[in-house]
Image (cartoon, rainbow, N blue to C red):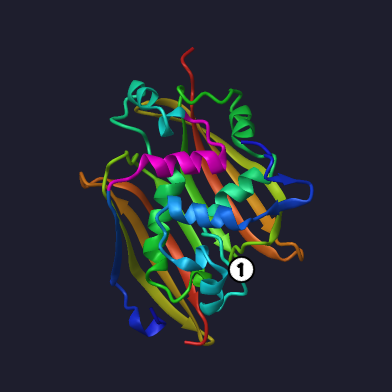
Amino acid sequence: MSRTDDTDEEGFTVERWMAYIWAEATRNDNDVFRSEDAAVEAGFDGQVAPPTFGYYLARAASEVGIEAVAEATSSEVDWEGGIYWGEQTLEFHRPLVVGETYRVTDAEITDVEHKAGSSGEFDVVTQKYEIEDDDGEPAFDSYMKTVVMEGEE
Amino acid sequence: MNFDDLVEGREFTKTFEDVRVEDMFVISSITRDNNPIHYDPEAAESLGHPGRVNQGSINMSYATQAVLSALDSPAQLERINVRFERSVYEGETVRATCTVEEMSVDDSEGRVDFSVALHKADGERALNGSATAVFDEV
């Protein structure tokens, strides 16, 4: 997924509904992700976004989406051929919060490793994203590994 | 939990019953994930799955919630890592666990390293991983 309507050069602003609905769909019952009052009571300045939303924000707000990953393996996005999420790491410098505008300052494919396994040959694509908040302070880093199966010749 | 409530080996569990396709639809919509295995049962079946496949982001969130249940505040989560091993399907019941692996204190800052996992009903693990949390002024 490349840059979407959620973002532009001005950055990605986390809106209240995104945090609320992400919490609902992932069955997260902590109300700091739903209400400003609950978050303030818990010591935050405002409503918080679920940490796992960060992986999506990083990818959506950068040019390194699923198409770029497929391109790095000289293929196109082919769900039937097999593209899998292998690994994800999120490192937070501060909590992800609603109302904040985030910018991806660095997004790159750092490695493409060709491997052979029992189900065929595949590439493991490593992506790195560094994200800052609106004040230019480091917010979080995202590291992602995507497995792209090699198509039949 | 306070830092003092944690001890190496202590496990925290959160169970998620009956994984819902409605949640997959929501995550597909928010993330514009057009992979049909998350919404089209026939596409999932033709790729060898017994049902629609829960998104990795939902599985990662389940695992993260086990970690958050061990903390005072989500603000304490410094790092989460997950390696996806198996798919989770609609209707499945899964159990997220996190276990305190190592604790340390440096200059009144407490750090806790956890191992995390998401267990499928058949005993396989959907994911394995680790997490680190920081507790101030312990």
Instruction: Say whether residue A79 is visible.
Output: yes
Q: Residue at x 61, y 24 (%)?
A: A74
Q: In the rendered image, which quarter is residue A70 located in?
A: top right
Magenta: main secondary structure equals helix
Instruction: Say whether residue B78 is visible.
Output: no
Decide which of A112, A145 is in the foreground and name it: A145
Q: Secondary structure at mark 1?
A: loop
- Does the segment drawn in magenta span residue B76? no
User: Tag 1, which chain?
Assistant: A
Q: Is residue B64 left or right of residue A56?
A: left
Which residues fall within the magenta stretch?
B18-35
Q: Is residue A10 left or right of residue B40?
A: right
Q: How many marks?
A: 1
Q: Quadrant of the N terminus of chain A?
A: top right
At label 1, which amino acid type do we have? Arg
Q: Is residue A138 left or right of residue A148?
A: right
- Does the segment drawn in magenta span residue B34? yes
Which residue, as the protein is rendered here, is positioned at the far top? A153
* Classed neighbour count for the residue bearing mark 1: other residues with Cα under 10 Å, few (<14), some (14–19), many (≥20): some
Which residue, as the protein is rendered here, is positioned at the far left? B122
Decide which of A66, A57 is in the foreground and name it: A57
Return the x and y of residue A24 as percentages of the image width and height.
44, 54
Return the x and y of residue B86 as percentages of the image width and height.
34, 40
Q: Is residue A52 left or right of residue B4?
A: right
Return the x and y of residue B5 as percentages of the image width and height.
34, 82
Decide which of B21, A37 is in the foreground and name it: A37
Which residue, as the protein is rendered here, is positioned at the far right? A9
Q: Residue at x 44, y 25 (%)?
A: A121
Decide which of A1, B9 is in the foreground and name it: A1
Q: Which residue is mark 1?
A: A94
Q: Residue at x 40, y 61 (%)?
A: B65
Q: In the rendered image, which quarter is residue B68 located in?
A: bottom left
